[in-house]
Image (spheres, helix red, strand yellow):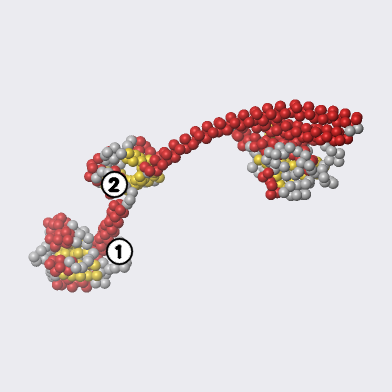
């Protein structure tokens, strides 16, 4: 791996001047060449200079090449070392390997091409070793500086190395951790191994729940991520394990779970109390409304009789009073009937089936006392609009909407009421009742479906204020919704949305 930004620096040591000159002449264009006439001169030069490759002749006075390279190896281990020998001395080569840790040896006379290749190979080895050392030092710095515990261990559970954060977390020194292995600190190690198999992504095992145990028995909840980083010398798989202490998080989760359980219990108790109260209120409302109906009917009948007597006597004042009493009693009876229907709608069971919208609307109009010259009705033909709904409830809703449309169009010269239906893309059914009557202020949309909410004075348009609230409750029982659109003097449209058949069936099954 040659570095383009710098030349290979080579130190050549030989006691023969001719060899030094020949080496410099052969390689001065390829390398940054430095020569020395003796081992002592070379050692002195190395004290202050950096070099990539050191080449030494074996036979030199005072110190052999093997001895010289042995000293270089001890003092400056990074440079690659080559031995140059002029005879086949096997022992010299062995000494050079043992003492100097040489990369290779070259025999004299050397071939320039071969020697150049050997130097480049030696430098490449030097560069690779240097890069490896640099990366290792960087890893060591990260390893020790990490705030999270890091453990190097093999597949057998032996701990190879730990960082300082691991010692602090487990309150145990490094030597004890290396001697004890994973079994000494991990609770339920077989269970952890099983969880590892389900969290594998290539060579990484992410977010494994583990519980570590300190020497004093303290439990620590952690999340571990293991990465396969190679093998040991005896071919056992090696892992780097990153550990995150989540004890505080676990304690907070347990606290929240406990609070949620307590809250659920309180909600269940309050819900039951509320249901009981609503049941009592419903029963009370039904009882009151039912009990009121009988005396109101008596008041209505007696006021009607009183009016007849007044007519016979010719007492106009008494007749007017009796009519006012009769009218008030009739309104109260209508209100009581609406309250009873509203109360029953909450407890009534929904029985879903296909309902012909036009047929039900015709039944409603036949039962109404429509005024002479009433509105023109536009609606689908029988069989064209079939929706999935409860027959009785749908009829009540249509009756309220149609009667409202008739009531609010009676001041128009050409009253018109439209009953429409459309199947939506999601399978739901949209039904609407549209009129060209007095309309309403769109800013009061939310009030329309409230109990006793009226947008028009009772002196102008009679009513109890319960009809649309009853429609809203019926739609909620079906799992649908309703809303209104309109403008003053431009009519109003009430929309009913019935959910798709499958969704509605699933809701009822639940």
- Marks 1 and 2 sit apart, C-alpha to C-alpha, by 43 Å
Q: Residue at x 16, y 64 (%)?
A: 56
Residue 495 vertical placement versus 132 (above, below)? above
Q: Is residue 480 visible?
A: yes
Badge 1: residue crowd in 10 Å (few <14, some 14–19, many ≥20): some
- Picture layout, residue 135 above or below residue 392: below
Query: Viewed as shown, does residue 395 lie left or right of 138?
Result: right
Q: Nearer the viewer, residue 432 or 260?
A: 260
Which residue is tagged 2?
Answer: 168
Q: Which residue is mark 1?
A: 2
Work out whether 103 lies above or below 279.
Answer: below
Q: Position of residue 189 (x, y in %)?
A: 32, 37
Residue positioned 14% across, 61% down in the render: 71
Please identify the quarter of the rendering in which residue 334 is found: top right
Left or right side of 23 for 365: right
Residue 8 on image: x %, y %: 26, 67
Labels 1 and 2 touching (C-beta < 8 A): no
The image quadrant that residue 389 belongs to is top right
Residue at image position (77%, 44%) is 435
**149 versus 292 height, above or below:** below
């Amino acid at each position: 791996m040659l570095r383009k930004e710098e030349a290979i620096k080579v130190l050549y040591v030989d006691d023969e001047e001719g060899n030094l000159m020949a080496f410099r002449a052969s390689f001065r264009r390829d390398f940054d060449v430095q020569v020395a006439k003796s081992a002592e001169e070379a050692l002195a030069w190395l004290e202050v200079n950096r070099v990539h490759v050191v080449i030494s002749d074996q036979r030199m006075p005072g110190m052999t090449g093997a001895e010289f390279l042995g000293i270089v190896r001890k003092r400056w281990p990074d440079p690659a070392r080559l031995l140059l020998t002029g005879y086949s001395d096997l022992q010299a080569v062995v000494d050079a390997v043992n003492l100097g840790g040489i990369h290779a040896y070259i025999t004299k006379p050397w071939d320039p091409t071969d020697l150049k290749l050997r130097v480049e190979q030696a430098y490449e080895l030097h560069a690779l070793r240097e890069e490896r050392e640099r990366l290792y030092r960087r890893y060591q710095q990260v390893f020790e500086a990490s705030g999270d515990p890091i453990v190097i261990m093999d597949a057998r559970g032996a701990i190879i190395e730990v960082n300082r954060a691991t010692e602090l977390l487990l309150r145990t020194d490094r030597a004890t951790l290396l001697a004890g292995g994973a079994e000494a600190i991990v609770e339920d190690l077989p269970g952890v191994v099983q969880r590892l198999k389900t969290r594998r992504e290539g060579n990484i095992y992410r977010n494994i729940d583990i519980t570590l145990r300190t020497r004093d028995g303290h439990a620590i909840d952690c999340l571990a991520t293991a990465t396969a980083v190679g093998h040991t010398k005896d071919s056992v798989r090696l892992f780097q394990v990153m550990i995150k202490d989540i004890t505080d998080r676990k304690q907070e989760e347990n606290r929240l779970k406990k609070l949620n359980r307590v809250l659920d219990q309180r909600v269940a108790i309050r819900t039951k109390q509320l249901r009981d109260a609503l049941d009592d209120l419903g029963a009370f409302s039904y009882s009151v409304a039912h009990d009121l109906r009988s005396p109101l009917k008596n008041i209505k009948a007696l006021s009607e009789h009183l009016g007849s007597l007044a007519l016979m006597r010719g007492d106009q004042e008494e007749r007017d009073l009796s009519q006012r009493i009769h009218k008030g009693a009739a309104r109260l009876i209508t209100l009581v009937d609406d309250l009873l229907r509203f109360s029953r709608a909450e407890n009534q069971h929904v029985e879903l089936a296909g309902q012909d919208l036009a047929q039900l609307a015709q039944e409603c109009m036949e039962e109404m006392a429509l005024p002479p010259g009433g509105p023109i009705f536009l609606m689908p033909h029988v069989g064209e609009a079939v929706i999935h709904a409860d027959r009785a409830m749908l009829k009540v809703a249509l009756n309220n909407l149609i009667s409202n449309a008739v009531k609010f169009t009676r001041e128009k010269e050409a009253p018109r009421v439209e009953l429409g239906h459309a199947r939506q893309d999601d399978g739901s059914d949209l039904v609407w009742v549209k009129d060209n009557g007095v309309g309403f202020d769109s800013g009061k949309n939310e009030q329309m479906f409230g109990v006793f909410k009226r947008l028009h004075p009772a002196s102008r348009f009679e009513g109890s204020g319960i009809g649309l609230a009853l429609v809203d409750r019926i739609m909620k029982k079906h799992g649908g919704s309703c809303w209104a659109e309109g403008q003053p003097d431009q009519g109003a449209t009430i929309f009913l949305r019935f959910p798709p058949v499958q969704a509605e069936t699933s809701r009822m099954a639940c």
